[in-house]
Image (spheres, rainbow, N blue to C red):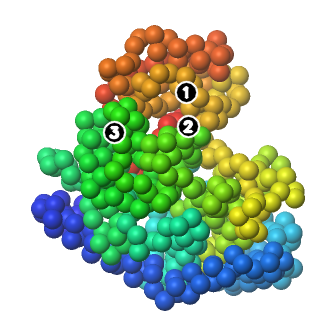
Amino acid sequence: MGLLELVYDHTPISFQNLMCSGSGAVKYKQRYDRGYWEAREFCRDFDLWPLDRQLEYQREELARFVRFSYLHSPFYQRLYENVDVSAVRGPEDLQVLPVIDKEMLRANIDDIYTVPRKRGNESNTGGTTGKSLTVRMVPGDIQMRMAVLDNFKARVGFENLKMTRATFNGRHIVPPGQRRPIYWRWNAPCRQMIYSSFDLTEERLGFYVESLNRLRPQALDGFFTSMCDVASYMERHCIEPEFRPVAIFPTSETLTDAGRELLERVFRARVYDQYASSEGAPFVCECPEQVKHVELNTGVFEFRADGEVLVTSFTTHGTPLIRYAIGDRMELAPGGTTCPCGLKGPIVSKIEGRRLDFLYRPDGAKINAGNVSNLLKYLPNTIIRSQFRQSRMDELTILLEVDERRFEESHADGILTECRHTFGPDMRVDVCVVEEIPRASSGKFQMIVNEV
């Protein structure tokens, strides 16, 4: 534990709020300097450019980024030793370059960096792959990425830094052993109330709701499942929100249709999804029509035959990503599909989560997250939270946090029946009702834990 964490844990909550705001001030300087405002103006203008001009910008930026990476990264110099990088003039030329994956990044990370530690901001990535990776980002890239995100939010009416937001993330803001039921801290520079995602128990959710009603945020953002926990509690207890956000912006987790409908029903606001990654992948953002568009000014997506994408990101100058097999799958809408919103970027019809965001049938078939979540959709509003754990091909454990007032043994029998239909008769399924399902060390809740 660092000194600041030690001090934080042993100070009053009022001082912890000051420390959160102090940390927020540091991040504010990193993210919202002059480069950010220039990038915001560029993003607004880019939205209005005709498609041919946007594609020409993408081509020029791609060629420039590949040359930069080759000149400044020892790893890419070795990787492209027998490649004429000047031949890469557009996305169609990327196939002359080899594909890289996360293990290659991890094993060669010191040679991939283009800047020393003192000139970059380091952050750690994780996720369902189980590999930890430290990436370096230069200030210009950080500010550009924040500008793209805030331009996405502004399209649907939310102005970051001017409006108040409630954020559910993985920061450890509640010290161990805290007794007061205050599971949130204030970041004044960003007009942001940060809510702990580690303390969302049935007994504590009421305090979260009371805090949100006092705050009256104009947006909710952060972990999708955490926001769904709050919404589910409010619906089960017939609690109406005393505020109506402009929008809801989930991050970090794959959305489900049922979860989106729940959030929109409870908070009477639309959910707008966006795709990126902690490594720095290009962006895919939903427009006001809730249609997903590729942000052409942030990079290039290549689509393999099986739907897996390779990403090349223009905002990764510190740790370049070129033809990176990120492990996600996407589908483009049929050619000629247009959107009434007016955005020019290609339309993405479907995004699937990481490759481990599924379970196996005993015969090796994959059951994706959407189908897994459907195993519970017909139950009468009794499941607070569920987790599907698989360590063998023919064994599945389902952990359930339930509403004890409504849950009946017959509901567990119904789950087993659905599992037999989905996984077949050879799958051994145990349904376990538990008081609390543990979260991952990051604070995220994992619906699927695939250890096969």
Quadrant for the C terminus in the image: top right
Vertical position of residue 272 compared to residue 296: above or below = above
Q: In this view, does 82 lie to the left or right of 159?
A: right
Q: Mark 3 points at which residue?
A: 239
Instruction: Report whether 213 appears left or right of 301.
Output: left
> How far is the residue under mark 2 from the one under mark 3?
19 Å
The three-letter code of the residue at mark 3 reads Ile
The disc, 2 or 3, on the residue closer to the chain's N-terminal end is 3
Given the image, on which type of amino acid does mark 1 rest?
Lys
Query: Marks 3 and 2: in contact by CB < 8 Å?
Result: no
Q: Residue at x 50, y 30 (%)?
A: 389
The first of marks 1 and 3 along the sequence is 3
* Place of residue 37 in the rendered image (x, y in percent of width and height, measured from the top left): 52, 85
Viewer-nearest residue: 340 or 138: 340
The picture places residue 330, in percent across and down from the top left corner, at 72, 51
Q: State left or right for residue 431 relative to residue 279.
A: left
Q: Position of residue 69 (x, y in %)?
A: 68, 79
How packed mark 1 is, by other alpha carbons closer than 10 Å (few <14, some 14-19, many 20 or more), is few
Q: Residue at x 63, y 73 (%)?
A: 320
Decide: is 55 above or below 103: below
Marks 1 and 2: CB-CB under 8 Å?
A: yes
Instruction: Identify the residue at image location x=45%, y=51%.
Output: 223
Q: Could you say which disc has been placed on residue 377 in the image? A: 1
Report the label total. Answer: 3
| Residue lying at 32% horizontally and 21% vertically, measured from the top left | 404
Disc 2 marks which residue?
258
Is residue 180 or residue 427 the one in the foreground? 180
* SS for callout 2: helix
Q: What amino acid type is highlighted by mark number 2?
A: Ala
Location of the N terminus (image quadrant): bottom left
